[in-house]
Image (cartoon, rainbow, N blue to C red):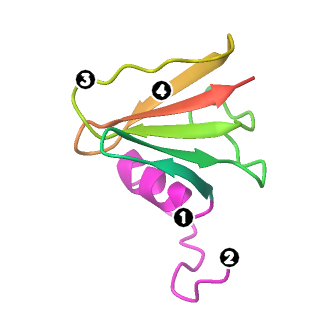
């Protein structure tokens, strides 16, 4: 991805975690998007903000309550943006 203005904000200050979550989404490949959630695939091995290991998928929940049906047992890491929306990072 070569967004000119998505330049390297060299983190001189650990600003808000929330902003980096939004930014992180820009580097992921959208897979599914509906009214309850959006799913993105991590095709470039970006590190999970929670545990630092590359994750497989990011699931962004768009509603206060959402049910996920997972087809496999997997590890999940969770973060939230400034609106309190959960961001789930899956590790297979
Ligand atoms: Zn993780």
**Which numbered mark, 3 or 1, is in the foreground of this view?**
3
Mark sitting on residue 78:
4
Q: Magenta stretch: give its range.
A: 1-27
* Residue 88 in picture, x, y percent from top left: 49, 31
Q: Which residue appears at 50% of the width and 18% of the height?
A: 69
Check disc 2 and report the residue beneath it: 1
Check disc 3 and report the residue beneath it: 65
Mark 1 residue crowding within 10 angstroms, few (<14) / some (14–19) / many (20+): some
The yes-or-no answer for disc 1 within 8 Å of ligand 1 is no
Q: Which residue appears at 32% of the width and 38% of the height?
A: 36
Measure the alpha-carbon separation of dots 3 and 4: 15 Å
* Residue 55 in picture, x, y percent from top left: 70, 36
Mark 3 residue crowding within 10 angstroms, few (<14) / some (14–19) / many (20+): few
Measure the alpha-carbon separation of dots 1 and 4: 18 Å
Q: Earlier in the sequence, mark 3 or mark 4?
A: 3
* Residue 16 located within the stretch drawn in magenta: yes
Q: Which residue appears at 37% of the width and 49% of the height?
A: 18
Asked if disc 2 and disc 4 are in contact, CB closer than 8 Å, the reply is no
The yes-or-no answer for disc 2 within 8 Å of ligand 1 is no
Taking the image as four quarters, which one is ligand 1 found in? top right
Q: Earlier in the sequence, mark 3 or mark 2?
A: 2
Measure the alpha-carbon separation of dots 3 and 1: 24 Å
Mark 2 residue crowding within 10 angstroms, few (<14) / some (14–19) / many (20+): few
Measure the alpha-carbon separation of dots 2 and 1: 8 Å
Q: Earlier in the sequence, mark 2 or mark 1?
A: 2
Asked if disc 2 and disc 1 are in contact, CB closer than 8 Å, the reply is yes
Drawn side of residue 45 relative to residue 59, left or right: right
């Amino acid at each position: 991805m070569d967004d000119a203005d998505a330049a390297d904000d060299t983190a001189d200050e650990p600003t808000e975690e929330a902003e980096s979550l939004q930014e992180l989404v820009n580097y992921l490949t959208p897979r599914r998007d509906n009214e309850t959630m959006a799913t993105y695939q991590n095709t470039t091995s970006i590190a999970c903000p929670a545990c630092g290991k590359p994750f497989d998928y990011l699931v962004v929940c768009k509603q206060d309550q959402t049910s996920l049906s997972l087809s496999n047992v997997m590890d999940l890491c969770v973060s939230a943006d400034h609106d309190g929306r959960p961001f789930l990072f899956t590790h297979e």
